[in-house]
Image: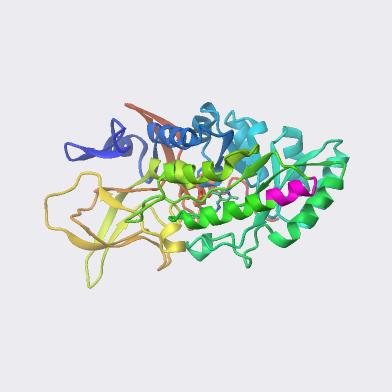
Amino acid sequence: MTAPFHYVDGRMHAERVPLARIADEFGTPAYVYSRAALEANFRAFDEAFASLPHLVCYAMKANSNLAVLNVFARLGGGFDIVSGGELARVIAAGGDPAKVVFSGVGKTAAEMRAALAAGIRCFNVESAPELERLAEVAAAAGRRAPVSFRVNPDVDPGTHPYISTGLKENKFGVDFASAPALYRRAASLPSIRVTGIDMHIGSQITELRPCREAAAKLLGLVDALARDGIPLEHVDVGGGLGIRYRDESPVPLHEYAAMLAGLMRGRRETLVLEPGRRLVGDAGALLTRVEYLKRGSRSFAIVDAAMNDLLRPALYDAWHPVDAVAPRAGPAETWQVVGPVCESGDFLAHDRELALAPGDLLAIGAAGAYAMAMSSNYNARPRACEVLVDGDRVHLVRRRERVDDLFAGESIAP
Ligand code: LLP
């Protein structure tokens, strides 16, 4: 496959569709996804584990558009969810609840009831009180809740502190030492069925070492539990594999898969994986138009997308590629690419060398993951539309919000 976003005769295309045509038809800002890239990413991930019994549960927090979920559901994917809202999205997208694992430190009783009723595959339980609540909810519903504990292997993933989750000081998971007692407690509860174990140490990980270290620790615990008379059916290693935004060297999929296949050799448990970013990150771009050029000691390209559309630069100082959809021959200048939101933190990119004129279209790359999913209506800005390109066809998969959508749920007090 050619890269999903590429130039043909000096004009950027998504698959076979010129991005300028999408901007004309649907306006900007617009999120553009490539179906071919989504499918290729899923297949590559799934096929890398072909030698093992496994289930790929896409961490849908990365991008929960129904059309994206549907692409993965059709390929047999399961889903890692973190809320009742995400479960409803899976069902609306045609996903199979029996392939859903439910992560998160704060599941409400209502969310537990909905997930039990839907028949999800597993609750990834993150604390002792969560186990007790789940046992009560399941007993009241006359069901047995399938449970895996998220354990915290205390391994440093070497990533941004905001997206590092596997250290002792993080709020996630139960610590290693207390896991055996929790498993014994779970095994004693009639409304609980112990099925697995899981972890997730962080996101945008670009080294194999922490993944190997954490997985090996996890399997050590699985063996100890088996000796204790608590055999498990699955081992969930979470997500976290990074992608290239700028110059990172992501872990090659085959190395990651070979590492896990080595550790799983001769074992009976099913391997569950929760990739998010790796499946969607490079499959999306944010298309935006230059509104104004403001030249000075620092020159600003003010575009029609902002931090409410793409928060990652403002929140994590994340670097995304910014490219002209139709590059100009003229001399390049250095631009701060910023949006219209009233915050100095509202920037999409710093110090980019581009030849620009007002009205030009820019594509902000690697914007398929944690992009639209983290958008907001800050500054009363309607959210962008989303389109899915499939060969030479373009499907509008989420219409642009209208201004009256913004306050449709509000009312004035008498
Ligand atoms: N499983 C669990 C339990 C998770 O918490 C996450 C991500 C994943 C799987 C998927 O991780 P991935 O494969 O996408 O790295 N907003 C941040 C990323 C937050 C990740 C949160 N958890 C960003 O924009 O970089």
Considering every residue shown, the one lying at the far left of the view is 330
Residue at 74% across / 46% down in the picture?
Answer: 226
Question: Does the magenta segment cover residue 225?
Answer: yes
- Which image quadrant: the C terminus? bottom right
Foreground residue among 313 and 302: 313
Q: Is residue 146 left or right of residue 355?
A: right
Q: Is residue 289 left or right of residue 401?
A: left
Relative height, residue 281 to residue 380 (above, below): above
Q: Position of residue 318 (x, y in %)?
A: 40, 60
Foreground residue among 27 and 368: 368
Q: Is residue 266 left or right of residue 373?
A: right
Residue at 59% across / 28% down in the picture?
Answer: 94
Q: Is residue 157 visible?
A: yes
How is the structure coloured here? rainbow
Q: Is residue 215 left or right of residue 137?
A: left
Question: Does the magenta segment cover residue 81?
Answer: no
Residue at 74% across / 42% down in the picture?
Answer: 231
Relative height, residue 46 to residue 220 (above, below): above
Q: Position of residue 311 (x, y in %)?
A: 45, 57
Number of numbered markers: 0
Q: Position of residue 100 (x, y in %)?
A: 64, 37
Report the magenta stretch's main SS: helix
Foreground residue among 262 and 411: 262
Relative height, residue 152 to residue 255 (above, below): below
Q: Write down the region rendered in magenta.
A: 222-229
Q: Position of residue 30 (x, y in %)?
A: 39, 43
Q: Is residue 383 visible?
A: no
- Which image quadrant: the N terminus? top left
